Image: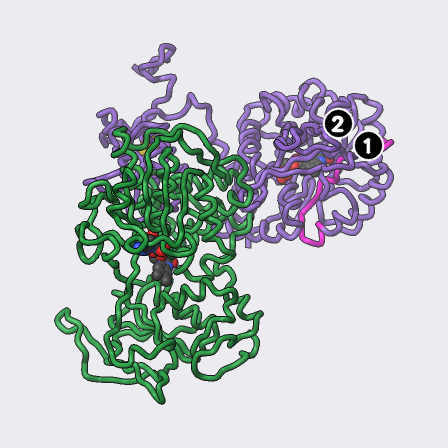
Amino acid sequence: MADLSIDFVGIKSPNPFWLASAPPTDKAVNVTRAFEAGWGGVVWKTLGEDPPVVNVNGPRYSTLMSQDRRVIGFNNIELISDRPLRTNLDEILRVKRAWPDRAMVVSLMAPVDEAAWRRLLPMTEDAGADGVELNFGCPHGMSERGMGSTVGQIPEYIQLITEWCKHYSRLPVIVKLTPNITDIRQAARAAHAGGADSVSLINTLNSVMGVDLDRMTMIPSTDGAGSHGGYCGPAVKPIALNMVAEIARDAQTRDLPISGIGGISTWRDAAEFIALGCGSVQVCTAAMVYGFKIVEDLCDGLSNFMDQRGYASIEAFRGGAVQTVKDWNALNLNHVEKAVIDQDHCIQCGRCHVVCEDTSHQAITATRDGRRHFEVREEDCVGCNLCVSICPAPGALAMRALASGEIDRRTGERVSGEYANWSMHPDNPMRVAASAD
Amino acid sequence: METPATRSCGLRAGRLSEADYARNFSDAHPLLTRAQAMIEAERCYYCYDAPCIAACPTGIDVPSFIQRIAQDNLRGAARAILEANPLGGMCARVCPTEVLCEEACVRNASEAKPVEIGALQRFAVDGYLAEPGEPLFRRAADTGRRIAVVGGGPAGLACAHGLARRGHAVVLFDARAKLGGLNEYGIAAYKAADAFAQAEVRWLLSIGGIEARSQQMLGRDFTLQSLLDEYDAVFLGLGLAGTNALGVDGEATGEAVRDAVDFIAQLRQAERPAEVPIGRRVVVIGGGMTAVDAAVQSRLLGAEEVTMVYRRGPDTMTASLAERHWAQTHGVTIRYWSAPTAVAQEDGEVAGVRLAATALVDGRLVTTGEEHTIEADMVLKAIGQTYLPEPTGAAIALKGGRILTDANGRTSLARVWAGGDCRYGGRDLTVEAVEHGKRSAVDIDFALSGQEPDAAPELEAAHG
Ligand SMILES: Cc1cc2nc3c(=O)[nH]c(=O)nc-3n(C[C@H](O)[C@H](O)[C@H](O)COP(=O)(O)OP(=O)(O)OC[C@H]3O[C@@H](n4cnc5c(N)ncnc54)[C@H](O)[C@@H]3O)c2cc1C
Ligand SMILES: Cc1cc2nc3c(=O)[nH]c(=O)nc-3n(C[C@H](O)[C@H](O)[C@H](O)COP(=O)(O)O)c2cc1C
Ligand code: SF4
């Protein structure tokens, strides 16, 4: 049996699944239930200085659903913890004592004010926290007060506050980043420069969920008006993966531990974050949609996967896919693929034909000998993968890589088998001549 | 089910409790809920050149109407359906979709379960009819042309609607008291519950320009020639007014041996099913849709034993597999390879049906010499209906006993079109009758106006 336990920047937990700082980690009662269910750790709902914030009493959450009402995306306009700081700290102390083997990270938020951070950090340490996470990500409400993503969007602030935290506390510092930014590397580098032990990402994305067309009001609204919220859930996973990968492959931050967050709902999602370098993963939406029990399925799936692949520990495959994430300019332009339709699995819906015909390269037939028949014409196929991406029948469409020496029937050229990217391409005016000859 | 009120032999009304009648004759396949419709709509792959469109005799753009349901646009969905098939509401209820659109669904290949096109079609049309709002179709400016449509079944209604849309004035004659043809008098009660046939007729007529004249019979109250004298064109949607006889001893035993279509019409027109007498042991002779409907409705009226008798095997039966399953789950026994030779009687009452075993020998159906009797106190004959040519006289060429036409329904007689069951070469389905009527309307319009078919009609007059 694979060992799921982790030691993430000195914080130990029996499995890599932590509940992200959010309603599931809001109170002792929730966190106790989470630990009973088997979660490896929690990042306690973000604490700020008293007086506590006040939440709206109208809808805080709303969702984007598929037609069969599965949640694809989740939006919230909730603020940080709205309970007194002392109440939270007392509960943290009590729960950590009862569950010493679980990770207890405490999320903190304060303005760009050294005194505030100096007050918060020792209290958190006294409450028995294993680490702190700095919430530089919340994009709604708190950001209007100069906190959360407002800090996370200014690298200088990230660095400054991280330095303060490292100064006023011995605890590991995890800096939680906002995705509402152009280049995530700037934020990660700033955290690194400030001495952060780790970054975690992503927090939520700015979002308006829709418009109620009968009332002509945005959704969600409270008393006829709404405010943009933070978007998370399965829909944001690809965005999160990209940002994680950018940090994991950046020369300045490649050794910075990452706690991966964003749309993790299955063991597979978690494994993908780990493969792109994450040492722990955090989950919020999936727990808010299904309850805490899903951690059993996450652990079971991850463990079976690791056993099958012979990975004895999380470390054994962590970062395994990082080196495959490259700049576009480094991609091999001599590699040629063609779509292939497996007639035994094709259900004849014809969607590949019409999308290739309408929006790609007119490379799939609709008939043969007057009968409905879909087949790729290799002489027209550019290998774009559109047909494969939209095919509803499993196993019916796949891409095939041409072997070296094979003729690409579209260009009439032989596949060389040699690597050549854009920087070496004859059509590139800025081409660097191959140095050997 | 409650204890039957009576289990005695012979024809008896009121065999069941009122509660059981109500349950038995309610909607066989109730309207999908919104949640069900949304999930089902999601299953449609929106195929290219979708096979279901080709499989629908009226060519409804199935992927489009389903996409519109998924996009919560029932009005648009209804438009896509009714544009191609003005009787899309009835067809959604009665079409044997398992051999039409749903048979062509590509989901059959991947998971042996097609998208429920019929149920979605009903969801769209019923949803639209419940809250019609502005009319979907409007009548074009009056052309001054007058057309007689004889027969108010699906073929005649579709033709009249198509002609009225194009601005022609239609007089719609029917021998019966109510319009609808077999929609009103033939379709099984549980397929067209809640008086849907009349609701649909009202909607069709609301386009305006159609004057309905009921209890007016061609050949009795007027002649084809009189119509040709008075109207610019005539469409005949006469259906099949005759029935085949068994030609066996004891066939004329009165009430207890009757044509299934009459029995069904009586049931459809009855105030309450409890009024309709039914035997305790019923034998239905025939292997088509009518036989299935008669057998199942006999069971629902309280018959304890119902046997369908068919002289060949399941492969040639016109009732589809789904219909046979429907009969069997309603407790109907199907006896294949059995041909009736006599209706047995005792004391002047029906006592049973004498059957000869049959077999295929060298491709020919023969009796094997073995015989047996099924006890019965009622026999329903469903061995096919026939076209009665007398009302039109000898002027129109027939083939196979029905009216010969071209693809657009033109008969051998100038200015006369025909469609539906009375036309040669069809499958005797509601949806085909609709397509015939629809096509003939286009062709009549073309013949009268000399314009290319389907020139967009101008907008005028209302139609909900
Ligand atoms: C019991 C039964 C069940 C069926 N179930 C189904 C089913 O589930 N699904 C399906 O697709 N099909 C079914 N069918 C077949 C379907 O009902 C017919 O194919 C369809 O109704 C044919 O339409 P039509 O307009 O040609 O004829 P009809 O519906 O028969 O209409 C003909 C009309 O013409 C009138 N008429 C006849 N002669 C004259 C005259 N001389 N003068 C004036 N008016 C006249 C009649 O009164 C009638 O109103 C069923 C048929 C039967 C008998
Ligand atoms: C209702 C709600 C409240 C949240 N509150 C906080 C918070 O107080 N502090 C914080 O750092 N992140 C907060 N988040 C963001 C989550 O911790 C997490 O980063 C985000 O939801 C992405 O993960 P997911 O896709 O698994 O939900 C909140 C998210 C939700 C849905
Ligand atoms: S890979 Fe792209 S170009 Fe090739 S057949 Fe598929 S859709 Fe067309």
Say whether residue B237 is left or right of residue A223: left
* Observer able to see residue B98: no
* Observer able to see residue A431: yes
- Residue located farthest toward the left when viewing the structure as drawn: B362
Q: Position of residue B241 (x, y in %)?
A: 30, 60
Q: Which mark is residue B417?
A: none
Residues indicated by labels 2 and 1 sit on the same polypeptide chain: yes
In this picture, which residue range is highlighted in magenta?
A34-53
The subunit letter for the residue under badge 1 reads A
Q: Position of residue B449 (x, y in %)?
A: 28, 30
Residue, disc 2:
A142
Residue, disc 1:
A53
Say whether residue A110 is left or right of residue B270: right
Chain B drawn colour = green
The subunit letter for the residue under badge 2 reads A
In the image, residue A42 lies in the stretch drawn in magenta:
yes
Going by the numbered disc 2, the residue's amino acid type is Met
Q: Position of residue B461 (x, y in %)?
A: 46, 32
Instruction: Decide: few, some or many residues near mark 1? Use Cα within 10 Å; few <14, some 14-19, many ≥20.
Output: some
Q: Position of residue B113 (x, y in %)?
A: 40, 54
Say whether residue A41 is left or right of residue B198: right
SS label for mark 2? helix
Q: Residue at x 52, y 75 (%)?
A: B14
The one of B328 and A330 positioned closer to us in this rendering: B328
Q: Are marks 2 and 1 in contact (CB under 8 Å)?
A: yes
Chain A drawn colour = purple
